[in-house]
Amino acid sequence: MDLNIAEVCIVANLQTMGPLYVTDAGKGFFDNNSGMLLAARIIITSGMGNQASGMNKLHGPVPIPELELDQQYLCYFYINEMTQKPNPDTPYSTGKGTYIVCIVIPEEIKNDIRPYEKQIEDILNLEGKGIEFSETMSGELTTKLTEDISVRMKSIFEHIMQSFDLAPLFEATSLFNLGLIANLPPHISIIAKKLILNPKGLPERDLKDNKVVNTLINADLVTRVTKDGESWLIPR
Amino acid sequence: MSDQIGTLTVYSTRGGNGKTITSVMLATAAAKRNLKTVIIDADLEAPSLMHLLKPVRDGPTWVDFLEENVSDIRELPRECNIPNLDIIYSPLPKVGKNFLGWKTKDWWQQSLKRSMIAEEELHDIGYDLVVIDNQSGTSLNSVNNMVLADTSVMVIRPATYGVGAAENFIGEMYRVLRDLKPRQDYYMWNQVHVPTDDHESLILENFLNRWDESMKLHGLLYGGKINFSTKLNLGLLGETPNMMDFFEETRKPIDSLLDKLLQAKGIETS
Ligand SMILES: Nc1ncnc2c1ncn2[C@@H]1O[C@H](COP(=O)(O)OP(=O)(O)O)[C@@H](O)[C@H]1O
Ligand SMILES: [Mg+2]
């Protein structure tokens, strides 16, 4: 098993309902997360797709064997039951089935996404914590839970993709940065361009896309001020 | 007259191609057509207007504005001996202090913002045409000035190494600029030697054709051709050159370039 391939994983410890652990692949096995992994009933991993193996395989970031994926993926949700062999030397092993849920990051964008690991980790932590696992305490993986997890995973995946697109924004200090403008996704750059072509600012109602505007404000690239009772946006 | 023509920058990939001469001649031609014109000496590495169009009085400079020592744009333009033409000067860089080197990327980004506001305000206070004598190369300063302008003229000299070096990067730069806002980018040959026989004619023609094709591929429009002028070349060696003396030397190509620029804006002058 090649531990270098998968980059990010979340481990949900169902027995304690404790924190989610995000770690990268190289660490998953032998550091102090591994106890948690062995104790876990559901492991949520987000890993990089590995097409280099010729088969669509996700190499486990956790002590799990390679998962074989049965289709080409863009966003892939895999729920599988596997049996964790009891390990008499550790206090953690349960010997019960462990469920594995994966988000697979496609091979093609693997390298692009690497520099933004930190942001992805944050999203995984934030989103992953919202997952309600109480049902699994019985040991049953119900259809409903499977569906819930799948919906959650989709949303995490979308967040990752969006954050990936937005990463340059959060690294920038000003909108007056051509390199930045040239590399933004089109729905954002169209607003960003409008703003920099109006260096003194624009009334907020001239910009239709609230979501993008808020992202720009969060990224500290636009300031919102009130002029004559009207909300204006000023590029930084 | 008060037709807003916009903002034009004269650019080149390396120094000595003729940006300053082209800027001054173009601005003079516009002023002669009763267009209220201002030239900004924005070549902070090698400002020339302090020498070529000597200021008639003291005052704050473009650098003072960028450095936020001056905030009112109206303090910057200074008149010169050509009617309808004002100048915003830049000071000679201080010895031992590399102005451009110690400015951070953040500073240049804020400088773009300030310059864009200034550009807007210069039109607001009545200038029909703003001409920016740009710095050459790929510095943040030169690219900023390209962003300010809605029209650019790249001055190139016929020398393989000169244009060849340009080609690698102009495609990308102009693509990014055009994506930002509608604009027109021209190129203009300068210092073209007049051939003395058929053989020389052929060499020159082949050369120019090859590069004309390549410039077109990058979306640049043909701006014309200024021949090498010994009068202009030697005339500029003096301590106090009178720019008006050289106007006739470049008049035809400059007037025709100005016609093109004005036509593109749908403005008629005579
Ligand atoms: N058409 C021309 N004919 C002869 N000499 C020229 C011509 N254009 C420019 N020069 C010479 O080239 C020098 C550099 O021109 P300048 O306009 O200062 O270039 P830049 O601003 O691009 O550095 C000038 O001193 C002038 O002598
Ligand atoms: Mg110059």
Image (tube, grey):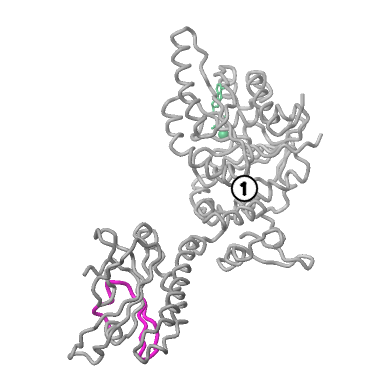
Q: Looking at the image, which residue sits at the far left?
A: A88
Q: Looking at the image, which residue sits at the far right?
A: B1
Q: Horizontal placement of A16 versus A67: left or right?
A: right
Residue B210 position, x and y percent, is: 45, 23
Q: Please, what is the three-letter code of the amino acid marked with disc 1?
A: Val
x 72%, y 66%: residue: A231
Work out whether A145 lies above or below B53.
below
x 59%, y 23%: residue: B224
Q: Horizontal placement of B249 versus A16: left or right?
A: right
Q: Chain of mark 1?
A: B
Based on the picture, tell me whether residue A19 belongs to the magenta stretch: yes
* Residue A118 image-quadrant placement: bottom left
Front position in the image: A234 or B192 = A234
Based on the picture, tell me whether residue B213 belongs to the magenta stretch: no
Work out whether B148 lies above or below A68.
above
Work out whether B90 lies above or below B234.
below
Work out whether B12 lies above or below A100.
above
Q: Which residues are magenta?
A: A10-32
Which residue is labeled 1 in the image?
B63
Residue B86 position, x and y percent, is: 72, 36
x 42%, y 89%: residue: A134
